[in-house]
Amino acid sequence: MPEIDAMSIIEAVFPELSGRHILDVGCGKGALARALSVRGVRVVGVDPNGEALKAARQTAPTAEFYMAGAEALPFADRTFDGVIFLNSLHHVPESVMRRALLEAARVVISVGPVIVIEPLAEGSLFSVLRLVEDETGVRAAAQEAVREALDDGTFGQLNRIEYLRYDRYTDVDELLSHVISVNPSRAEVARERRAEVEAAFLRCAQAAADGRMTLEQPMRAHVMAVTV
């Protein structure tokens, strides 16, 4: 699979990003919102985590942020030029994943795309991280929710892209620090299983040219258009 990234996929979908009005669903601490903002996008981010939103407002000060779940977006119909889920659909409760996609279909303009980019339950990074939190089930559920939305005609698929994301860390402590920052509830398990995680890290990671250690995460991107 080619070494591409989420932003290259987004830029291919929107050849002219500047001036677009885009919703970042599950925006977290604002990394995507910042990357879009510097490209001239009018970004709106939503996330149910208030602490993450505080960080996002610092990371992307020109964007707008709201506390909301993906399944109940506080926006009028046909508000946005595009909607993006980046590594976020599998964090939505399984019972409302389909509702979250229907909400995305509701708030995007009729010709606007919905982009869902998700990690798969495979790869060397997943092999290490599953020792702290095994996301096999939720990652599969996210793909199933997308499949159902395509099968029932909510969306038509414009493109499906599979690629490898390469994550680089100096050592296992940097990896665990990142894992905990994404979800602080993982801290206790991370501490308890540190030795196992380190052993898996040393077994699975490959040394990069800069001396850091590389782990591979297979990704799948769905680029879809609303059909209802």
Image: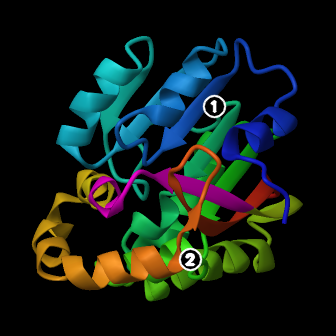
Q: Mark 1 points at which residue?
A: 80
Label ID, residue 203? none
- On the rendered image, what quadrant is the C terminus found in? bottom right
Q: Is any part of residue 74 visible from this angle?
A: no
- On the rendered image, what quadrant is the N terminus found in? bottom right
Numbered disc in front, either 2 or 1: 2
Q: Mark 2 points at which residue?
A: 124
- The residue drawn where x is 65% and y is 11% is 40
Q: Is residue 195 left or right of residue 96?
A: left
Residue 170 is inside the magenta segment: yes
Among the 4 quarters of the image, the one containing residue 16:
top right
Q: Which of 171 and 42 is in front in this view?
A: 171
Q: In this view, does 91 lie to the left or right of 155?
A: left
The magenta-colored residue range is: 164-175
The percent position of residue 5, horizontal first and vertical second, equals 71, 46
Task: Answer above or below: position of 79 versus 186.
Answer: above
Gap in angstroms between the C-alphas marked 2 and 1: 36 Å
Amino acid type of the residue that numbered disc 2 sits on in the rendered structure = Ser
Task: Answer above or below: position of 96 versus 33.
Answer: below
Q: In this view, does 214 lie to the left or right of 128?
A: right
The percent position of residue 65, horizontal first and vertical second, equals 36, 28
Q: Is residue 109 left or right of residue 227?
A: left
Q: Nearer the viewer, residue 134 or 178?
A: 178
Mark 1: secondary structure: loop
Q: Is any part of residue 3 visible from this angle?
A: yes
- The residue drawn where x is 46% and y is 88% is 137
Q: Nearer the viewer, residue 120 or 80?
A: 120
Amino acid type of the residue that numbered disc 1 sits on in the rendered structure = Phe
- The residue drawn where x is 63% and y is 18% is 41
Callout 1: 10 Å neighbours few (<14), some, many (20+)? Answer: many
